[in-house]
Image (cartoon, rainbow, N blue to C red):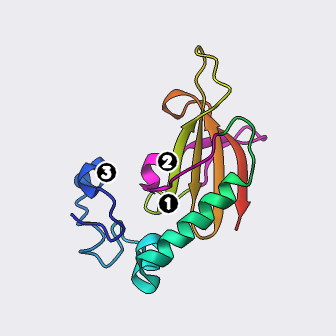
Amino acid sequence: MEAICGADCNNCGFGKNNNCKGCKATGGCPFGKQCFIAKYILTGGKENYEAFKLQLINEINSLDIPGMPKINDLNPLNGCFVNLSYPMPNGENIKLLDNNDIYLGNQVESEFNDGEIIRCFGILANMNFILVSEYGANGDNPEIIIYKKR
C-alpha cells in the first residue's frame, strides 16, 4: 500500500484489517471518502500542502493553550484511531469525528504533568476545524479544550 502524502500505510492495522488498498491505488479515497490531504497534494502539489501544514501548525501554536508545548509537526491520522467520545454538559457522550476520514494531528504531553498523573493534548485538524483535547492514558477522560472552525 502506498500513500500520496507519504504516510506509512503498512503500519496501519485498521487498513490491513479492512482490505484498504492505500490512497495511491484508490485515487486518494482509502476509506471510501476523498482524503483532504491527498486532494490537496493532487491539485496543488506537495509544496503547497507543506505550506498549508505549516500555516495550520502556526494557527495551533497561536492558540497559546496553557501547558501545551509548541507543535512542530502534524501527521496524517485515520479517524478510527482518534475519534474519542467526549462528555457533554447534558451528560451525553458524543464523537465529533468520522472514522473514515483522515485528519492531521499530533499528541504531546502536558507541561503540567507531575509524574503521577499524566495528561496529553491531542491536536486534530483538517481544512475546516482545529480540535484540541486533553486526556489521560489511552484517551481516558477526554476533555475538549478548543474546537475552532477555520
Circles 2 and 1, Cβ within 8 Å, touching? The answer is: yes
Looking at the image, can residue 83 be seen?
Answer: no
* Amino acid type, callout 3: Phe
| Tag 3 secondary structure | helix
| Tag 2 secondary structure | helix
Density class for disc 2 (Cα within 10 Å; few <14, some 14-19, many ≥20) is: some
Indicate which disc, 2 or 1, sits on the residue closer to the N terminus.
2
Report the residue marked by disc 2: 82
Closer to the camera: disc 3 or disc 1? 1
Span colored in magenta: 69-96
Report the residue marked by disc 1: 103
Quarter of the rendering containing residue 23? bottom left
Circles 3 and 2, Cβ within 8 Å, touching? The answer is: no
Q: Is residue 83 magenta?
A: yes
Q: CA distance from mark 2 to mark 1?
A: 9 Å
Quarter of the rendering containing residue 56? bottom right
Lateral position of residue 77 relative to residue 70, left or right:
left
Lateral position of residue 67 relative to residue 21, left or right:
right
Q: Nearer the viewer, residue 66 or 39?
A: 66
Indicate which disc, 3 or 1, sits on the residue closer to the N terminus.
3
Q: Residue at 63%, 40% (x, y): give it.
A: 69
Q: Is residue 40 magenta?
A: no
Looking at the image, can residue 32 be seen?
Answer: yes
Density class for disc 1 (Cα within 10 Å; few <14, some 14-19, many ≥20) is: many
| Tag 1 secondary structure | strand
Task: Give residue 68's position: percent from left, percent from top.
Answer: 66, 39
